[in-house]
């Protein structure tokens, strides 16, 4: 399995970064602890040829199922009624899985999103596709190392502030769809700002697992 | 603001329906171009249409250079910055783009084109559906009623002579008879069908020219309170338009609301008037016209409520005038805010009746959604005989400072809406201000006291990201216009009209007057937009706008308008030597 992945990846790693497809994803969860957090909303938008394809945005709320502890409302602003008729997680995961298998996964803050997603995969008996993952937080840290060397300034890591830092517009709404698009724009801006040429460089600077 | 929200607000392709927006959303692509890089070259610039979301782009076209900012459009096959062109990012720029074919399918000519689509600018002549129905002046009501039933119409024209081969000349029309006339003047009074139409018809007949834009016809109907207007083309009556024809053009027509008011349905008035205003604004109607249309409705509501009060309390024991003031007096109020009104009675000694009357009207207005303003300018508190009012106005004008100045700023914009007492003596007192430069100077000083939120280098100064449009833009323009119009001896109240009067009186150049009108329109329009958005979210509408939520175009217009307001204040300072006052 691992061998196959490396073979596929090697062919992709050397080509210009734009030739890979990146799915930028955001999850809204009932908390930050991956062991208990349930997914309430998910969104993903692809970057193809270096361009964010807003029209392909996939965004959905998710029915958390029985036994979910309602928490984190201050972050996700959802109330139980808003997700009670939403699709079940399994269908959402299958759809996301199709996206992930197309290329590279991009998230802002992989420590939370990845374990939650991987745990959800396991809970539904699905195999994690072991796709390459780029974390925009790590790209920001990379940018900070460069900037600090020059100016001693720090780079904010929070999604909204990082966008403002890079001159991207503010998105006042914080739902999964906005944050997925916000992450995608941030990702493209960071790639340009860091001067990354290949996927290999992106994974070296911002890779996560 | 998310991408679709931005496109909706920036309106790069004019007013779009939700379906068209969805179509754009499905094809929207986001590109990021760092500073100094080329966005597009000459050969491929017709493939995509670009919208600047953030940043700045330099466009080279036909040997010229343009600098485009947020919310501006370039590329594609149409528009001011159509291909072939070359574009470079002047700053790190976030751009939205669509394949040109997608944009071609939704693009419309903005502004005027949208009005045509929504129907408000269609010449009213095009709405005439059927040939004219008329009866001779000798006909009886029974004959007229039969003719109306036969033709399936709700009104007939009464003509002194039969139409010639070219139609009925306007001069031959002596009256109009509507189904309402038959109900209220014939049936309700127990008259028989043999009554001649001449004795119950309405006369003279108000007409409208066939080339008149539909919106103006709507305003005219509201103004006259009629439901039928004969349409005249080349001196001949071409047919009839009815309010129903006009309502059909728009879901939330002001005329529809007027009908409901007449039927006595006032409970949801505030909500409905907001919908009507929103629909007009969406249709691209100029904000001054929206204010006028809404003002007719507010007046109609007020008269309706007053009629109900009379029904309860009986006829008035003395002549009176029910007067609105403040923004309502200027016909600039759109969403119902506080009640600003006062009562003038012809003579002393009817306090009991008029106190009860004012209470009843205030209650009726608040039931319709005009919140009462206890302690404010309300007829429940502000009611006096005319003589006392003259005295009060003179007192304020003689010492226009402090509280008196505040009173003047509200009361001077008075406008009677009901009652038959003439306010001519009060008008004359106000008119005399023209010859009192010190009074005008005090008022000018009040105007200069509003802080226009501009920083150095014409930057917009916001507080917590918000700008107060009332105190920072609308109020200074309104106050300046009031001073200048009074100085010009004009009696008009509306700020747009006052600015025209100031220009005619040569107190303001034509360009400055037009600039000030434009600035006021921007202020009123942005405020109304934000208020309607707040209402849609279930929030209390205020006077502030969030700078972040403005499109680049709106922001630049706001900045320009603030600058204009400040220039106007400067002009007043110079005219009244306010620098000497400290």
Image (tube, helix red, strand yellow):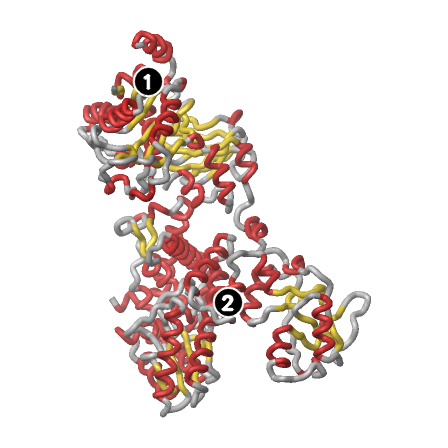
**Residue B220: mark:** none
| Cα distance in 3D space between marks 1 and 2 | 63 Å
User: Left or right of A152: which side holds A27?
Assistant: right
Considering every residue shown, the one lying at the far bottom of the view is B349
Residue B252 spot, x, y in % from top left: 51, 58
**B419 over B285 or under it: above or below:** below
**B67 over B557 or under it: above or below:** above
Q: Quadrant of residue B425?
A: bottom left
Element marked by disc 2: helix
* Camera-side residue of B498 and B381: B381
* Camera-side residue of B563 and A194: A194
Q: Measuring 36% from the left and 29% from the top, which residue is drawn there?
A: A92
* Camera-side residue of A203 and B390: A203
Q: Quadrant of residue B231?
A: bottom right
Q: Quadrant of residue B242?
A: bottom right
Name the chain letter of the residue that bears numbered label 2.
B
Element marked by disc 1: loop
Residue B507 spot, x, y in % from top left: 44, 67
**Does residue B418 appear anywhere in the picture?**
yes
**Does residue A168 appear anywhere in the picture?**
no
Considering every residue shown, the one lying at the far left of the view is A152
Residue that label 1 marks: A129
Name the chain letter of the residue that bears numbered label 1.
A
Residue B389 spot, x, y in % from top left: 36, 84
* Camera-side residue of B237 and B41: B237
Residue that label 2 marks: B260
């Amino acid at each position: 399995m691992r061998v196959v992945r490396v073979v596929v990846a090697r062919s992709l790693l050397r080509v210009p970064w734009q030739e890979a497809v990146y799915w930028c994803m955001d999850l809204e969860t009932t908390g930050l602890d991956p062991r208990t957090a349930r997914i309430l909303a998910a969104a993903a938008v692809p970057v193809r040829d270096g361009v964010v394809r807003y029209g392909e945005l996939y965004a959905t709320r998710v029915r958390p199922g029985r036994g979910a502890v309602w928490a984190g409302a201050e972050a996700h602003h959802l109330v139980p009624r808003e997700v009670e008729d939403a699709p079940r997680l399994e269908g959402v995961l299958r759809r996301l899985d199709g996206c992930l298998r197309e290329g590279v996964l991009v998230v802002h803050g992989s420590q939370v999103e990845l374990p939650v997603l991987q745990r959800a995969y396991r809970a539904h008996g699905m195999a994690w596709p072991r796709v390459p993952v780029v974390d925009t937080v790590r790209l920001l840290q990379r940018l900070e190392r460069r900037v600090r060397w020059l100016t001693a300034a720090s780079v904010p890591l929070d999604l909204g502030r990082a966008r403002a830092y890079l001159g991207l517009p503010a998105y006042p709404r914080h739902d999964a769809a906005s944050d997925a698009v916000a992450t995608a724009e941030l990702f493209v801006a960071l790639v340009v700002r860091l001067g990354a040429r290949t996927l290999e460089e992106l994974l070296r600077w911002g890779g996560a697992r | 603001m998310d991408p679709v929200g931005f496109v909706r607000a920036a309106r790069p392709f004019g007013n779009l329906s939700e379906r068209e927006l969805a179509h754009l959303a499905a094809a929207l692509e986001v590109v990021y171009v760092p500073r100094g890089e080329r966005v597009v070259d000459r050969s491929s610039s017709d493939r995509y249409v670009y919208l600047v979301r953030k940043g700045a782009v330099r466009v080279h076209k036909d040997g010229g250079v343009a600098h485009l900012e947020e919310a501006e459009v370039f590329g594609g096959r149409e528009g001011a910055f159509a291909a072939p062109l070359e574009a470079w990012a002047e700053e790190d720029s976030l751009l939205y783009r669509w394949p040109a074919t997608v944009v071609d399918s939704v693009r419309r000519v903005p502004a005027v084109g949208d009005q045509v689509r929504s129907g408000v600018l269609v010449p009213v002549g095009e709405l005439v559906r059927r040939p004219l129905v008329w009866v001779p002046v000798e006909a009886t009501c029974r004959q007229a009623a039969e003719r109306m039933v036969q033709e399936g119409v709700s009104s007939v024209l009464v003509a002194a002579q039969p139409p010639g081969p070219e139609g009925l000349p306007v001069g031959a029309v002596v009256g109009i008879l509507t189904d309402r006339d038959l109900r209220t003047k014939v049936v309700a009074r127990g008259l028989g069908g043999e009554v001649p139409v001449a004795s119950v018809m309405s006369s003279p007949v108000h007409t409208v020219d066939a080339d008149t834009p539909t919106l103006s016809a709507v305003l005219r109907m509201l103004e006259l309170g009629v439901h039928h207007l004969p349409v005249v083309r080349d001196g001949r009556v071409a047919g009839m338009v009815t309010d129903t024809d006009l309502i059909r053009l728009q879901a939330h027509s002001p005329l529809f609301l007027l009908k409901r008011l007449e039927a006595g349905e006032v409970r949801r008035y505030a909500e409905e008037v907001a919908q009507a205003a929103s629909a007009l604004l969406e249709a691209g109607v100029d904000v001054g016209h929206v204010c006028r249309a809404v003002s007719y409705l507010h007046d109609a509501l007020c008269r309706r409520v007053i009629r109900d009060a009379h029904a309860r309390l009986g006829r008035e024991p003395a002549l009176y005038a029910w007067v609105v003031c403040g923004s309502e007096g200027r016909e600039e109020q759109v969403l119902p805010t506080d009640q600003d009104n006062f009562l003038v009675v012809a003579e002393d000694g009817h306090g009991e009746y008029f106190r009860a009357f004012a209470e009843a009207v205030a209650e009726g207005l608040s039931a319709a959604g005009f919140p009462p303003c206890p302690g404010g300018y309300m007829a429940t508190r502000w009611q006096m005989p005319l003589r006392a009012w003259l005295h009060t106005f003179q007192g304020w004008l003689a010492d226009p400072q402090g509280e008196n100045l505040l009173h003047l700023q509200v009361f001077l914009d008075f406008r009677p809406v009901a009652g038959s007492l003439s306010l001519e003596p009060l008008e004359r007192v106000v008119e005399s201000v023209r010859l009192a430069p010190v009074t005008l100077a005090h008022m000018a000083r009040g105007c200069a006291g509003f802080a226009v939120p501009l920083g150095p280098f014409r930057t917009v100064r916001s507080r917590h990201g918000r700008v107060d449009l009332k105190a920072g833009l609308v109020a200074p323009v309104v106050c300046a216009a009031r001073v200048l119009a009074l100085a010009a001896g004009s009696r008009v109240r509306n700020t747009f009209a006052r600015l025209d009067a100031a220009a005619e009186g040569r107190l303001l150049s034509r360009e400055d007057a037009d600039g000030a009108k434009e600035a006021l329109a921007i202020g009123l329009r942005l405020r109304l937009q934000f208020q309607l958005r707040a209402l849609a979210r279930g929030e209390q509408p205020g006077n502030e706008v969030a700078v972040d939520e403005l499109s680049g175009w709106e922001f630049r217009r706001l900045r320009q308008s603030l600058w204009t307001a400040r220039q106007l204040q400067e002009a007043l300072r110079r005219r009244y030597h306010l620098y000497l006052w400290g």
